[in-house]
């Protein structure tokens, strides 16, 4: 039976909805009925939950309080492998959510703001490149057993070479943290 043959139930029909008496179940403070789902009813009616890490109240929508999130962020950062930076690309401060283009920029920032370099939790960024055109470009419009013209193949190769030569167009935090230097700023 297709959709046109299905029975129609109009909005004002007794079949569309009915009033039920004798229901029991969980109701949130907003009056929403949740049946046997106590957890959903409590969540709907609460404003705060307990932090998964320390047990202190935290706004609903967060599982972990700000202090514990900071501790988790530091632990995640410390667990990253260290690497020396080749001074190409960008560095990302996990603590400040800020990008830096050079060590000099970081030193100036720390001097101006009164931070230590070690407090910034610097991560070496990886480049984001423009996407290349696949070598099967246009195959979905070719005739069966058809092939791209040589000029189109050459154009795709030239385009991809130009994209490779252009280098990264943006940066994102990678998986390695900046190895500390001998002196700390």
Image (spheres, helix red, strand yellow):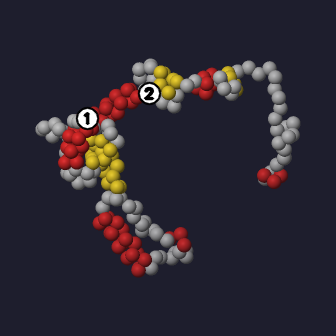
- In this orientation, which residue lies closer to the viewer: 82 or 105? 105
Residue shown at 69% from the left, 25% from the top = 31
Q: Where's residue 42, x and y in %?
A: 60, 23
Q: Quadrant of the C terminus?
A: top left
- The residues bearing labels 2 and 1 have C-alpha atoms spaced at a distance of 22 Å
- Residue 73 left/right relative to 4: left
- Furthest residue in direction front, as rendered: 112
> Where 153 sits versus 18, above or below?
below
The residue located at (83%, 52%) in the rendering is 5
Q: Which mark is residue 64?
A: 2
Residue farthest toward the left in the current orientation of the protein: 182
Please determine whether, in this image, residue 60 is positioned above or below residue 176.
above
Residue assigned mark 1: 119
At 31% from the left edge and 47% from the top edge, which residue is drawn? Answer: 99
Residue at far right of view: 14
Estimate the x, y position of residue 109 in percent, counting from the top left: 24, 43
Q: Is residue 95 left or right of residue 117?
A: right
Q: Is residue 163 above or below residue 9?
A: below
Mark nearer the N terminus (2 vs 1):
2
Give residue 158's position: percent from left, percent from top: 35, 73
Helix, strand or loop at label 1? It is helix
């Amino acid at each position: 039976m297709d959709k046109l043959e299905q029975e129609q139930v109009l909005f004002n029909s007794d079949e569309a909805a009915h009033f039920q008496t004798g229901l029991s179940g969980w109701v949130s403070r907003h009056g929403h009925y949740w049946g046997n789902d106590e957890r959903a009813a409590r969540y709907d009616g609460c404003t705060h939950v307990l932090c998964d890490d320390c047990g202190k109240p935290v706004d609903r929508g967060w599982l972990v309080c700000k202090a514990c999130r900071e501790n988790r962020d530091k632990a995640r950062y410390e667990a990253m492998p260290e690497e020396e930076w080749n001074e190409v690309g960008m560095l990302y401060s996990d603590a400040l959510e800020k990008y830096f283009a050079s060590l000099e920029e970081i030193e100036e920032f720390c001097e101006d703001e009164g931070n230590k370099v070690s407090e910034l939790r610097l991560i070496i960024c990886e480049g984001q490149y423009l996407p290349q055109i696949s070598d099967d470009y246009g195959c979905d419009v070719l005739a069966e057993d058809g092939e791209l013209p040589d000029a189109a193949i050459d154009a795709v190769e030239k385009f991809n070479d130009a994209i490779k030569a252009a280098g990264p167009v943006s940066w994102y935090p990678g998986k390695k943290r900046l190895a500390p230097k001998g002196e700390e700023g």
